[in-house]
Amino acid sequence: QVQLVESGGGLVQPGGSLRLSCAASGSIDRFYTMGWYRQAPGTQRELVASITSGGMTNDAVSVKGRFTISRDNAKNTVYLQMDSLKPEDTAVYYCNAFRIVFGTRINYWGQGTQVTVSS
C-alpha cells in the first residue's frame, strides 16, 4: 500500500517561511518523480514544483526564487522550502509521486496540508 504523508503546513504571516515534508512509504522508490501541487478554493490544482529521481527540478513561474524543492532518496522524502510567502500562496498543498511504466502514468497523492498566509 502506497502512502504519501505531508506535514509542515500552517498559518504564517506574509514574508514568512514554511517547510513542507512528504514521506513516502510502500512501493514508492527513488525512481519516482515527486512534486508539490496546490489548490486554492475555486481554482484548479496546479503544479508548484517537481523533482526527478536525478534531481532535476521544475518550478512554477509564480514561485521561482522563493520556493525550493529537494528530496532525500534514502528517506523517500520530498521537501518544499517556502520563503517570502505571499497571501496568494494560500492553498491546500498536495504531495504527488509518479512514474511512467510501459506508457502508463502511475500516480499517487497525499491527503493535503493547508498553508495560509495572512496577517
Image (cartoon, grey):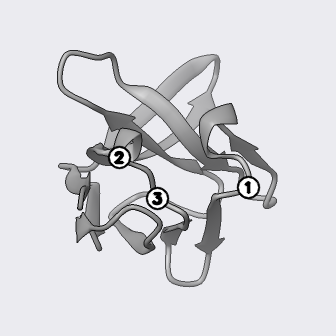
The amino acid beneath tag 3 is: Leu
Q: Residues within 10 Å of mark 3 (few under 14, many from 20)?
A: many
Tag on residue 65? Answer: 1
Closer to the camera in the image, 97 or 8: 8
Quadrant of residue 49 within the rendered picture: top right
Residue 69 location (% of width, % of height): 62, 62
**Image position, residue 100 (x, y; %):** 61, 30
94 relative to 72 in the view: left or right: left
Per the rendering, the mark at residue 85 is: 3
At label 1, counting other C-alpha atoms closer than 10 Å, the crowd grade (few under 14, some 14-19, many 20 or more) is: few
Residue 1 appears in the picture as rendered: no
Q: Which element carries disc 2, helix, strand or loop? A: helix
1 or 3: tag closer to the N-terminus: 1
Tag 2–tag 3 contact (CB < 8 Å): no
Q: Are marks 1 and 3 in contact (CB under 8 Å)?
A: no
User: What numbered label is drawn on residue 7?
Assistant: none
Which residue occupies the foreground of this view, 3 or 79? 79
Measure the C-alpha gap from mark 2 to mark 3. 7 Å
- The amino acid marked with disc number 1 is Gly
